Image (cartoon, rainbow, N blue to C red):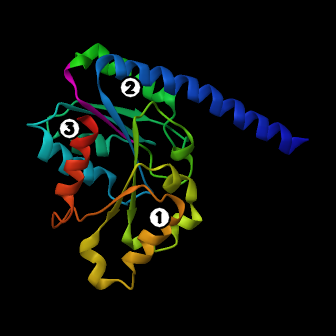
């Protein structure tokens, strides 16, 4: 009985969140903005990817960021240095952003700026391989990151995020010569779950693969 109640509660939460996510997406569509939900485990490289993206594309695209963090604005402050509007959301004990939290960020963005001027909103989710993939926030595409330091089996052990991803970024490729890691096996494990996902190996340190990522971003907006 207890397990049945918990399952029903979980389904109701997801349904309520989906309604809020659809409402957020309607706002983005009204303003002709594309939204990406950026997800990964802690330390996989989400913030540095956003730094490189803001730096490279700020003259071509008008970008805003909704930055999720449990307790601080450290990552938000890093991104503000690139001149983009950054709306920080502290989730407290929650291990993910949900659609209602992002709705609050959208309303702040609308209050402080003219949202119709933006081309892209990047939502940096809380570092977690499980919950963020289950709660849509109104995004048009999900972008998952996987660091090569996390091992080849992570997609199989945490399948939902990798099944849901529209683009999969394999990060920290500059460390490959120093690790006993099989990049082809990582890609094969991802393809086993999601045959059509776009996979882009990158190194934010050396710049490897970043141009392919920038082209993918612009293709989604086009």
Q: Residue 83 location in percent, x, y?
A: 14, 35
Residue situated in front as seen by the camera: 218 or 195: 195
Residue 110 vs 35, above or below: the answer is above
Name, please, the residue furthest toward the front: 196
Kindly identify the residue that appears in the image at 47 percent across and 59 percent down.
195
Is label 3 in contact with label 2 (beta carbons under 8 Å)? no
| Among numbered discs 1 and 2, the one appearing first in the sequence | 2
Q: Considering the numbered disc 1 on the image, is that residue within a helix, a strand or a loop?
A: helix
Kindly identify the residue that appears in the image at 29 percent across and 50 percent down.
47
Q: Considering the numbered disc 3 on the image, is that residue within a helix, a strand or a loop?
A: helix
Kindly identify the residue that appears in the image at 37 percent across and 17 percent down.
107
Residue at numbered disc 3: 80
Residue 103 vs 6, above or below: the answer is above
Residue 110 vs 65, above or below: the answer is above
Give, as a single range, the part of the protein colored magenta.
Answer: 117-124
Residue at numbered disc 1: 191
> Splitting the image into 4 quarters, where does residue 9 fall?
top right
Label 2: how many residues lie within 10 Å, few (<14), some (14-19) or many (20+)?
many
Locate the C terminus by quadrant. top left
Residue at numbered disc 2: 105
Q: Residue 130 location in percent, x, y?
A: 56, 52
Q: Residue 177 location in percent, x, y?
A: 27, 84
What main secondary structure does the magenta stretch of the protein show? strand
| Among numbered discs 1 and 3, the one appearing first in the sequence | 3
Q: Is residue 54 magenta?
A: no
């Amino acid at each position: 009985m207890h397990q049945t109640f918990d399952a029903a509660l979980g389904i109701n939460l997801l349904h309520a969140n989906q309604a809020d996510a659809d409402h957020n997406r309607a706002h983005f569509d009204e303003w002709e903005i594309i939204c990406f939900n950026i997800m990964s485990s802690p330390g996989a490289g989400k913030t540095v990817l956003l730094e490189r993206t803001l730096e490279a594309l700020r003259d071509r695209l008008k970008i805003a960021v909704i930055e999720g963090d449990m307790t601080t604005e450290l990552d938000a402050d890093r991104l503000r240095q690139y001149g983009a509007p950054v709306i920080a959301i502290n989730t407290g004990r929650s291990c993910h952003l949900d659609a209602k939290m992002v709705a609050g960020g959208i309303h702040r963005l609308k209050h402080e700026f003219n949202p119709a001027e933006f081309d892209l909103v990047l939502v940096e989710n809380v570092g977690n391989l499980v919950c963020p993939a289950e709660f849509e926030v109104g995004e048009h595409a999900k972008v998952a990151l996987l660091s090569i330091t996390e091992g080849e089996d992570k997609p199989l052990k945490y399948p939902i995020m990798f099944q849901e991803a529209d683009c999969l970024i394999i990060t920290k490729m500059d460390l490959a010569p120093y690790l006993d890691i099989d990049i082809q096996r990582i890609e094969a494990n991802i393809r086993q779950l999601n045959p059509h996902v776009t996979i882009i190996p990158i190194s934010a340190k050396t710049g490897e693969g970043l141009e392919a990522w920038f082209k993918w971003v612009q293709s989604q907006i086009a």
